[in-house]
Image (cartoon, rainbow, N blue to C red):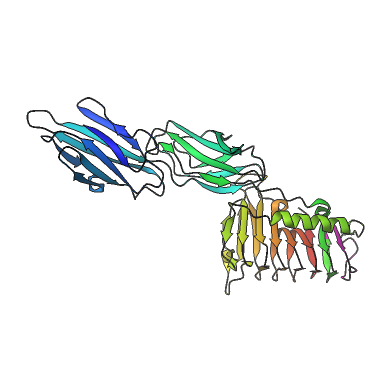
Amino acid sequence: MALVLTTPAPDANDTIAVGGATMSGDVNVMNSTSSVVLTGTKTAAQTVVVGGANAGLVTAAGTATAPTYTVDTSSISATGGSVSFTLTVAQPGYSSIVYTVDVIVPISNLASTGQTNTTATFSFTAPTGATAVVLEQATDIGGTWVWVPATTGTLSASSTTATATGLTESLPYEFELVVTDGSYAGTSNVVDVTPVAEVDLGLAAQYGVLAYSGITGTLNSTNGDYGTSTASDSGAFPLGAGTPDETDVSTAQGNLGTAIANASTPVPDAISLTGGEDIGGLILTPGVYHSGSSIGIGTTTGATGSKLTLTLDAQGDPNAVFIFQMPSSTLKTGVGSSVILIHGAKASNVFWQVGSSATLGTNTAFEGNILATVSITATTGDTVTGRLLANTGAVVLAGNPITLP
């Protein structure tokens, strides 16, 4: 008896026809397949009985000589896996023959979990039983996507993550996981990734506080420069609080404008945040996060404890980049909120691109560089490891220490 996959179109190995008293074979189908139809060929005198632990997932139909078997794979379509069952073929006067059939859906949940300007990290279901696991990458070369093995650490049947290194920033890539043997054999779903472009602050990087229309309030201290374009530094700046630098302001503001434009550039695989979302309480991995509206940290009414804290996890990558895009709105933090960096995350690689203005609530412990198109307001008790850079408006301070990362 031979079994042929009739729908959906197979990846490979679409026919099972092997000899011997006990027969077996694999059928590899497409990712996310929710059902598979096998058509058998037999004589009218033969009977076929479906068995095994997954017999309830197989529906028999068809004719006496061309039976069909519809296999329900919906339980594994989202992640990949296999459904195994038996077909026992009997005929009077002959010994029965048992087919063992494995319908395999390759890994379907390969997903991007973070990226830098030269790396991309992925998660997936462990490919149980695999003898080889390879992450492949492709780029568009003259209109043709050319697949090659990505540069990763060693992957195995127990791997659930992979990091591709040596990528080119801003270049679109496609990635897939190729598994040999085991319950997930075949080629996974394809994931598009564009490594984030490094945000170059230029001369603006030397400023702890940079404004266009004035700096007001009191600057506790900064290990960087401070300066403003069109108005005087009217705040109170104690001796040693920082270095006033008006000479480079014009160039720094131009560099800041370019950095804002770069940081706000749409990225195809950016992670979408709900407009107005309070991201306090979340643990986020490297990548680009986009909101069509405002972003808050600990701003939900009654937020306490962990809900006041945003954690940025670099996952051990010292070059990990986090970019938060709010191209048309605001950034706000709640009273007593904080941004915490773990597993190698650096404030110098965290960028908050704010389309209008940013306001830090009282006693906020903030990490990262605020690149605001208009203005920035810090309030009593706020501490900043990073930069407060306002492109067309003012920066308001309240005795805050600003530490360049």
- Classify residue 161 as left or right of residue 331: left
Main SS of residues in magenta: loop
Q: Which x, y percent locates residue 265?
A: 68, 55
Range of magenta residues: 222-241
* Image quadrant occupied by the N terminus: top left
In depth, the one of 92 and 102 nearer the eye is 92
Residue 224 is at least partly visible in this image: no
Can you say whether 86 is above or below 355 in the image? above
In depth, the one of 352 and 312 nearer the eye is 352
Q: Which x, y percent locates residue 161?
A: 51, 42
| The image quarter in which residue 21 lies | top left
172 falls in the magenta region:
no
Q: Which x, y percent locates residue 282?
A: 56, 60
Residue 8 is at least partly visible in this image: yes
| The image quarter in which residue 371 lies | bottom right
Q: Which x, y percent locates residue 210?
A: 82, 61
In depth, the one of 309 and 233 nearer the eye is 233
228 falls in the magenta region:
yes
Can you say whether 347 is above or below 231 in the image? above
Q: How many badges with numbers are in the image?
A: 0
- Classify residue 175 as left or right of residue 218: left
